[in-house]
Amino acid sequence: MTTTEEALAKERAEAKTTAALQAEFAKFHESGIKPNVSDPELLALLKEGRHITVEDSTAYTVYDGEKIAVGEALKRFVHDRREFVDGRTLPREGVTGRPGVTSKADLKTFKEKVAYVNKFGEAAFLALPLTGQVSSEIRTFEDFRKLPIEEKNRLINADPNYMEKLKPSPGHRMPGQAFINHELLERQKAIRPASRGKR
């Protein structure tokens, strides 16, 4: 293969990747979610620690341990990293595709708070939690343990070996691993020599 042919093949691969990413971003924007950063910045944030692959004109990446389309990964990413999105455009929990306010933190200005109270009433405003539900990518067993049962079931049904792929949490053991309390062992070692000398 000559240098020109290699350059053409590389250019075609880049064009294919660009077209697949543009299609995934179009799907993401159709959801009505409005990020606070540009598409290239959002893609750079998503790519941190992840690889993008293109198969059959669809761009994929691995998120939460499962291979999904980039458009779906972007939706999960902005739910997990809410500082990069206008929270009011995120779908409400349990209701797909319905944007709305889920916490007082979503109402940024006094004007927005007044508009919310005028529309839904003071009781509805007072019932809002101060901040939305904290969510993040599942990387450790501790993250997995905090999930609701339905989400745990969904992840394990999608991949029966899901838990084996998780990193152990500091101070916790993975299922099937022996738990060693190193702090207690050190205290016992410090106590034993002192108690033997007193006998």
Image: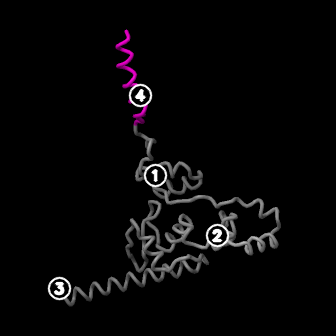
Residue extending farthest to the top is 199
Q: Position of residue 166 (x, y in %)?
A: 43, 52
The percent position of residue 39, horizontal first and vertical second, equals 49, 80
Magenta segment: 178-199
Kind of residue at badge 2: Pro
Q: Secondary structure at mark 4?
A: helix
Circles 3 and 2, Cβ within 8 Å, touching? The answer is no
Q: Quadrant of residue 128?
A: bottom right
Q: Which residue is mark 4?
A: 187
Mark nearer the N terminus (2 vs 1):
2
Q: Are marks 1 and 3 in contact (CB under 8 Å)?
A: no
| Foreground disc of the pair 1, 3 | 1
Residue position marked by numbered label 1 in the rendering: 140
Q: List the residue tagged with mark 2.
A: 91
Q: Name the residue that disc number 3 marks.
A: 1
Q: Pick the quarter of the image with the N terminus.
A: bottom left
Mark found first going from the N terminus, 4 or 3? 3
Question: Which of the two discs, 4 and 3, sits closer to the camera?
Answer: 4
Instruction: Look at the numbered discs 4 and 1 and tell me whether their residues touch, using CB distance below 8 Å.
Output: no
Specify few, some or many for label 4: CA neighbours under 10 Å numbering under 14, 14-19, or 20 or more.
few
The quarter holding residue 180 reads top left
Is residue 181 found inside the magenta-colored segment of the image? yes
Q: Residues within 10 Å of mark 2 (few under 14, many from 20)?
A: many
State yes or no: residue 146 in magenta.
no
Determine the residue positioned at 65% across, 60% down: 131
Give the distance between the C-alpha atoms of the residues marked 3 and 2, in whole angstroms.
50 Å
Residue 9 in percent (x, y) is at: 27, 85
Lower position in the chain sequence, tag 4 or tag 1: 1
Q: CA distance from mark 1 to mark 3?
A: 45 Å
